[in-house]
Amino acid sequence: MSDTAPAPDSARGPREWRWWACVAALWGLATAWDRLWLARDGRIPSWDQADYLNSALDHGRALGFLSGSWQGWAALLDLSPKIPPLASLVNGSVMALAGDSPDQASWSLSLWHALLLAVVAAWGRQLGGRRFALLCVALVALSPALMALRVDYTLDIPLTAATTLALWLLGRWQATVPRGGHLRQALLAALAIAAALMVKQSALLLLALPAAWAAAAGLRWRGRRLQVLLALAVVLAVVLPWLHHNWITTLGGTNRAVLESAASEGDPPVFSVASLLWYLRLLPQQLGPIVLPAGLLGFVLALGNRLWPELRWLSATGGPLRASQPRTSPHGEDPAPAREPVGFDPPSGWGWLLGCAVAGWLATTLSPNKDARYIAPVLPLLLMLLAAGWWQLGRWLCARLGGRTGAALLGAGLLASGTTSATAAVAALRSSEPNPLPALIARLRSEVGDAPTTLLVVPGSPSLNEQNVTTYGRMGGGRIEGRRLGRRRSEHPLVLERAEWLLLASGDQGTDRPGSRELSLRLRSDDRFGPVGRWPWSEGRQVELWRRRGQAAPPFDRDFIRLARGLEQGPAGLAAVFERIGPEHQLDGHFLYQQRVRRWALEELQRRPDDRDALWSLALLATLNNRPVEAGRWYGRLQALEPDNPWPAAYRAVVSLADWNPGAAGEALARLPADLRRQPIPRSLTELSAVLSGKLWRVPTLAGVLPDAIESVKRQLESAPAPEQPKRR
């Protein structure tokens, strides 16, 4: 590809630093544009953006950087129940330096973009030399899709940077000796893969096939087998602690984000023509209307030059191509004699890049949930491939029109591409969108100070929702949490009896849910609530801050203790807990009731060690807080106190299985009397514990008893009494 051989990795000196200075200058220009765009744009963070901002702030506080303190590893892992924490840890650390407003927090995206450009530069230099690498960097920086994501506070730019780094390092390791196959390369690639997975689990779409290919190839050679095993151990050591802590919520969140979202958004079936072409139709818009055709034209020139060297009008030099360079086998054997190619045979390294791009494209296309953002990690790979077409086109122009003219035309193409991307970005500006949240939150903080406060948000729109209320409510050390409740009519009595602060809106409430609109009308007509202030919103509407005038209903504490004690009834009591806990957590976004109940229960146990209410309350609190070891301890004490009740042992087995400890689950169930162990649910849990302990020959027994257990649970849930609703005082 290049007219000069790529510089070795160890090259140093003025030329090396000048080249990196050019890369840094391109990043600086892109960052300056991003900051200017953010300064002109007035949009409010939407659901996803606000959610990621809140997560970054949570992690920054957990690290002690943002008006918080270190609470231990378990508390840190609690903050990332559905998405791995690495990006939020980095972004939260940047917040501590740059500030916690949305625009200030966006500096973290600039740092992730710097990593992306650095990796593209290094990968491009490896493929075609320094000048070609600068072309790759320029195309990535000018991509309309990536330019838009650089100012959109999501995980797409961090994920793109992390996966590109992982693929590049993995490619360096899987290369033939002496360039590849070193232990240091394997460990670096493993760390990069683990880091990408800890940014977002969807990194698997980009990394699974290339990593499997590289590992399978490495296992064929004796010198690389140990490296593959060590690399796998590194990845597992990094990922497993988080996955072990959050695997249940991760599976549930992934199911909702992929399968349920695909169904609700009307995405096409996976193997339909519309699905297979879904991302292909976006390429001109995402890569640029100039970048794509120019790159394809360069490929036509390269392919024609390769297949028909006698067609001199295609040749940049006017002469036939040389034979491809001989390659070295992994064992360093003498290569076969070189011969004139008869097809398109890209140089070493390009096959890996092409394979990674195709694999990533295929895996992303086959994912049920479709969104233009999800293809972002593949775009740098495609842009580097298109850069090869641009490079060939530039060489052809230089040979036909002269070096200066050809370079000028290539530069004009880059300038035109940047102009089209900038024009699209300017068209996306929303400089006049009203933002009532700063003034509203300031008014609320003047009333509550730094006290932990939950603001119930009735509207639900991209510009006003519980997530961005939390974002603004926690800026500057605030402790205001936005929550949403009342979309279902069955939740209205709880809202009317327990809510303290509410956010309403005039007109349609910014939502098409009839339940939310009806709740707004009921609140306005209830003399227990009154307005505190109002501020202009969009489309002529206003947002209104309301508060309770009188004293709220008694706190949730006593009801929680009663619900916890109901767990001794089995699934019937569990149904009441599930029905009530979710809404109560919306009303108490700080979970203050848990602190009070825990304090009460521990004091009760000091006076009466066998107090059932206290033990059940502590067991349920530990279960809700994802503390399986602690929960198992409380359930164990209850099992000792109630040997004829199968449910403490069953709950203890469940939390032990959730903790990946089937042995402890089996031991708890083995202590039950024989007649209780034969009941459908304890028996199925016993068989499941045995199978997960490695006794696979008991799978048929598990399959036989599991239907009876499921039917038993259904019967008990159907017979459970309806949950009590708070009565109006």
Image (cartoon, rainbow, N blue to C red):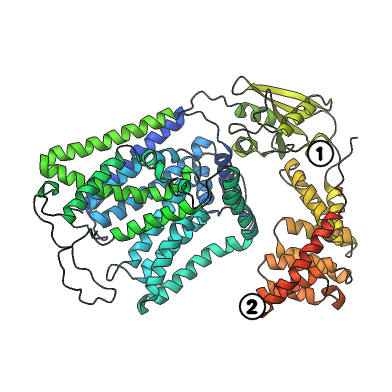
Residue 701 percent across, percent down from the top left: 72, 76
Residue 182 has which mark?
A: none
Q: Amino acid at mark 2?
A: Gly
Q: Residue at x 10, y 56 (%)?
A: 320
Q: Nearer the viewer, residue 488 or 231?
A: 488
Q: Nearer the viewer, residue 686 or 617?
A: 686
Q: Residue at x 46, y 52 (%)?
A: 364
Residue 117 percent across, percent down from the top left: 35, 48
Depicted 534 relative to depicted 103: above or below: above
In the picture, the quarter occupied by the C terminus is top right
Tag 1 residue: 494
- Of helix, strand and loop, which one carries label 2? loop
Depicted 553 relative to depicted 395: above or below: above
In the picture, the quarter occupied by the N terminus is bottom left
Q: 22 left or right of 623?
A: left
- Check if mark 2's residue and mark 1's residue have beta carbons within 8 Å: no
Q: Residue at x 88, y 51 (%)?
A: 721
- Of helix, strand and loop, which one carries label 1? helix
Q: 116 left or right of 271?
A: left
Residue 649 percent across, percent down from the top left: 80, 69
Q: Nearer the viewer, residue 306 or 461?
A: 306
Tag 2 residue: 694
Q: Is residue 434 visible?
A: yes
Q: Which picture quadrant has residue 499?
A: top right
Kindly give the residue lying farthest to the left in the view shown.
319
Of the image marks 2 and 1, the number of the one nearer the N terminus? 1
